[in-house]
Image (spheres, rainbow, N blue to C red):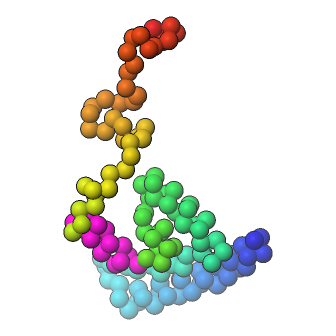
Amino acid sequence: MISIKNDIALMMVLGNKYSRFFTFIINSLFSNSNVTFKYTLLPISYYDASDYITDAFKLAQSGYSLLLPSLALGITQKDLLNLKDLENNALKLIDKLIPPSSAYTAGAGTGKVGRPELPAEQKSQKTI
């Protein structure tokens, strides 16, 4: 696996040069004062795609872009938007597929935060 990572690192030097070249060409042809483009090659291979997707998904859970894990899975931006529109607007899956309650979602909408309070007879002496 180390050999593959070394090979990817070596090839990404060339990939970054291609990215800069394509960015320059695209911007010289199509950019204006309001719109500029950036072409990027993601450092993903067949052997480390699942690790990259896992790391990108962890970032997405923290509020970072959902595009990186989607792109790493081979889903285009247009397909992602169409899929989300289908799920949310046409099929109304957001109302039908509700995730199970967790510590993060248990108090949502009730105004109460944290674990529900125990009755006095169930509390330990230290708590009382």
Residue 104: image location, x then y, percent: 41, 40
Compared with 5, 126 (above or below) is: above
Quarter of the image that includes the N terminus = bottom right
Residue 96's place in the image compared with 44, above or below, is above
Q: In the figure, is residue 26 to the left or right of 11?
A: left
Residue 46 location (% of width, % of height): 63, 78
In reply to whether residue 77 is colored magenta, the answer given is yes
Question: Does 33 lie within the magenta span?
Answer: no
The quadrant of the image that shows the C terminus is top left
Residue shown at 38%/92% (left/top)?
Answer: 29
How far from the left and from the top, in percent, is residue 67?
43, 69
For the stretch drawn in magenta, the main secondary structure is: helix
Residue at x 42% of width, y 55% of height: 63
- Which residue is drawn at the image coordinates 52% and 9% (left, top)? 126
Indicate left or right for 64 with 95 as reference: right
In this orientation, does residue 115 appear? yes
Give the residue furthest to the left: 90
Residue situated in front as seen by the camera: 11 or 94: 94
Q: Residue at x 40, y 28 (%)?
A: 115
Residue 52 picture quarter: bottom right
The magenta region covers 76-89
Side (left or right) of 117 relative to 110: right
Residue farthest to the right, as pictured: 3
The residue lying toward the viewer, choosing from 77 and 50, is: 50
Front residue of this view, candidates 76 and 100: 100
Figure quadrant of residue 109: top left
Q: Quadrant of residue 117?
A: top left
**Any part of residue 6 in sight:** no
